[in-house]
Image: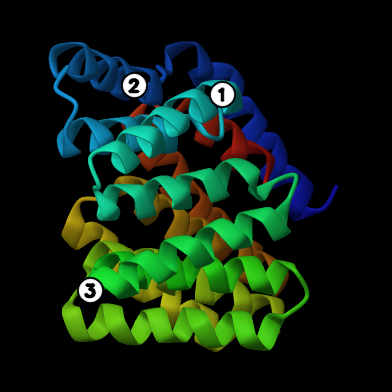
Amino acid sequence: MTLTHIIKKIFFLFAILTLPYALNAQKSKLEKLEEQLKKHTSLDAKRVDLLNEFAYETFNSNTEKAKEYNTMARLLADSIDYEKGKAKALWVTSLVYYKNNKKKATEYTKEALAIAKRIGDLEGECNYLMATGLNLKELGQPEEGVKMVYEALDIALKNDFKELLVRIYYNLSIEDRARGNFIEAYQKLQKVKDLAIELGNRKMEASSYTGIAIIFHTQGNYPKALQNYLHVLKINEELNSKREMISTYIN
């Protein structure tokens, strides 16, 4: 039996022993958002923001509900002329479409990007540049796509958008790894880890360790891979993240 198989068996054993104690952290967040929406009934920008956040949090787990809240956000943003909220709603719409219709998803991110540029929303522009770039890469336009992600990186660095920097560096590390540029990928993941720790973003901290583990795993350094996977496991146990724990066990 190879060391790789031994590592996977260890993760599977951890899953059996610890999974019954895991709680669904996302459910708690959604419950809080639903409570806020019940209390905040005013048809204003804050309600649009709450609807957008709820749709964003559910697009992976409950597409139909995400569509419902996303539609409400877009209609309300239009009715009160809240351009920033409309752009974000279009971006969330792109996430809902991404799995089944990447071309349509890209149309929505481009529309969101145009609005952000028009109203001078640099943070939104940065986010939608990254999203459009990643979509274009998946549509077979890697050079143009990666160029847009680096444009987003430039805006994020100039404006110290740390939350966006975490995501941009992470996505660029995936691109570097796919191209076999493991040193560059590792360096970006270190930046992801440092920023995530600074921001208290445990999910992205775990993602950075996962990315580093994959690099070591790919290069045949299984002890180092295991060391980083165990960091992921520890973080996810602390966060009571059942779904992410399962992912860690089977990598």
Counting other residues with Cα less than 10 Å from the Cα at mark 3, is it few (<14), some (14-19), or many (20 or more)? few
Decide if residue 80 is on the left or right side of residue 213. left
The amino acid type, in three-letter code, at marker 1 is: Asn
Q: Quick one: label 1 or label 3, which is nearer the N terminus?
A: 1
The residue to which callout 3 is attached is 120
Sequence order check: which comes first, mark 2 or mark 3? 2
Cα separation between marks 2 and 3: 30 Å
Please report the residue visible at 38 percent of the width from the left and 18 percent of the height from the top.
27
Q: Give me the C-alpha separation between circle 1 and circle 2.
A: 12 Å
* Residue at 36% from the left image edge and 29% from the top image edge: 54
* Residue with the mark numbered 2: 30
Which secondary structure, mark 1? Answer: loop
Mark 1 touches mark 2? (CB < 8 Å): no
The coloring applied to the image is rainbow
Where does the image place residue 217, in percent across and percent down from the top left?
Answer: 67, 65
Asked where in the image residue 213 lies, by quadrant, the reply is: bottom right
Q: Residues within 10 Å of mark 2 (few under 14, many from 20)?
A: some
Q: Residue at x 24, y 48 (%)?
A: 82
Residue, x 53% and y 29% (percent of image)?
A: 67
Badge 3 amino acid? Gly
Amino acid found under the numbered disc labelled 2: Leu
Q: Does residue 206 appear left or right of residue 213 in this picture?
A: left
In the foreground, 63 or 83? 83
User: Which is more N-terminal, label 2 or label 1?
Assistant: 2
Instruction: Give the vertical position of 185 relative to 52 (above or below).
Output: below
Q: Which residue lies most toward the right here? A: 1
Viewer-side residue, 178 vs 156: 156
Secondary structure at numbered mark 3: loop
Say which of marks 2 and 3 sits in front: 3
Residue underneath mark 1: 62
Q: CA distance from mark 1 to mark 3?
A: 32 Å
